[in-house]
Image (cartoon, grey):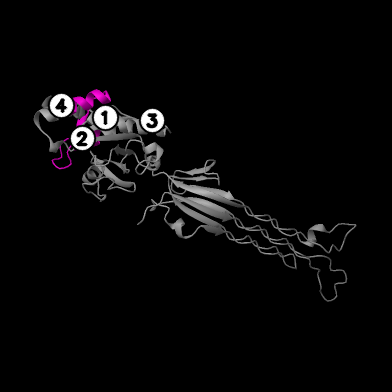
Amino acid sequence: MKFLDQAKVYVRSGDGGAGSVSFRREKFIEFGGPDGGDGGRGGDVWIEGVAGLNTLIDYRYQQHFKAKTGMHGMGRNRNGGKGADVTLKVPAGTQIFAEDNETLICDITEVGERHRIAAGGNGGFGNAYFKSSVNQAPRHANPGLPGEELTIWLRLKLIADAGLVGLPNAGKSTFLASVTRARPKIADYPFTTLHPGLGVAKIDDAEFVIADIPGLIEGAHEGVGIGDRFLGHVERTATLLHLVSAMEENVGKAYRTVRRELEAYGHGIADKPEIVALSQIDTIAGEDRAAKLAELREAAGVEPLALSAVSGEGMTEALRRMRAEIAGLAPSDEAVAADGAAAGNA
């Protein structure tokens, strides 16, 4: 399935049905009087979060949605029925913005959540409504009120518990593929990942969702490379796993580059709990390994994990650390002991 996280859509609610001008005509009834019914209300436009979706690709092929007009009133005091509603089904995590793409209308955060974004027009009154003691045979009725029309932006921000950040080829997709059943594209060239991916990791009978986004490079907040538009997909996460490749010549500089981009993006991402890890640790050994861990420790100000998706080193500790951050707990004694052992081996 193709991935699309932003779409522009035109919606219009239904017009109200017109009231009816009608008079009762029956044999042996001398004074029938008005009996025109009211028009029905126009259909509404709704936004609903549904399960099983993680993209807005459907709205690339259809951008216009119109609810039905209310039924017109009829004689014999028959009122018109309500027009059919239109429901736009979106993944949980979708935000709906006005045409300026800045004014937030609503935020769909849960499956089953519904918001009405355009109300249908009211139906017009039939001539029976206007009957009075001084006007016993009104020959006019109201037309229905027009519906609302507006252009909206749908912007998806994937809902995940933890997010992976780092430079291109830092091993984010490899990590995701190793700990979940997700199968992202993996290759040895930059920007292998072009779209965010999700996977469900399990550790100690606990499950959580991990989001992988395309790598950041220096100047991403200014549009360099793929830019920072995909950072929105880790805005809702509880923690970030910041991967720095052991193959980087200067791991401290690599760490600081990504941190600057996170801070330039804003929206609170730079303030999230961060787990720092030196990935692809199997590619170096001995003094190089110890030197790069020390360099990363100095740049980040915390003890980094040593990870290798190939050998499995540090993977369990990383998952436990992420689970603890998500649950709002301190790392378990077992994870702390394992971290201490890893640092001692370094």
Camera-nearest residue between 246 and 152: 246
Q: Earlier in the sequence, mark 1 or mark 3?
A: 1
Residue 129 shows in this picture: yes
User: Foreground mark, 1 or 3?
Assistant: 1
Per the image, the residue denoted by label 2 is 248
User: Foreground mark, 2 or 3?
Assistant: 2
Per the image, the residue denoted by label 4 is 291
Q: Is residue 217 above or below residue 330?
A: below
Estimate the spatial distance between the alpha carbons at disc 3 and disc 4, rounded to whole Å. 27 Å
Give coordinates of residue 151: x percent, y percent.
56, 51
Task: Please say whether residue 202 is one of the residues in the magenta stretch.
Answer: no
For the point 36% across and 33% down, the residue is 262
For the point 60% across and 57% down, the residue is 43
Q: Earlier in the sequence, mark 3 or mark 4?
A: 3
Amino acid marked by disc 1: Lys
In the displayed structure, does residue 309 sit left or right of residue 91? Answer: left
Span shown in magenta: 291-320
Amino acid marked by disc 2: Glu
Give coordinates of residue 242: x percent, y percent.
28, 34
Determine the residue located farthest toward the right in the rendered image.
134
Per the image, the residue denoted by label 1 is 253
Q: Is residue 56 above or below residue 300?
A: below
Q: Earlier in the sequence, mark 2 or mark 4?
A: 2
For the point 27% across and 31% down, the residue is 255
Camera-nearest residue between 254 and 166: 254
In the displayed structure, does residue 262 sit left or right of residue 154? Answer: left
Per the image, the residue denoted by label 3 is 263
Give coordinates of residue 142: x percent, y percent.
76, 59
Estimate the spatial distance between the alpha carbons at disc 2 and disc 4, rounded to whole Å. 12 Å
| Mark 3 crowd level (few <14, some 14–19, many ≥20, 10 Å Cα) | some
CB atoms of marks 2 and 3 within 8 Å:
no
Estimate the spatial distance between the alpha carbons at disc 1 and disc 3, rounded to whole Å. 15 Å
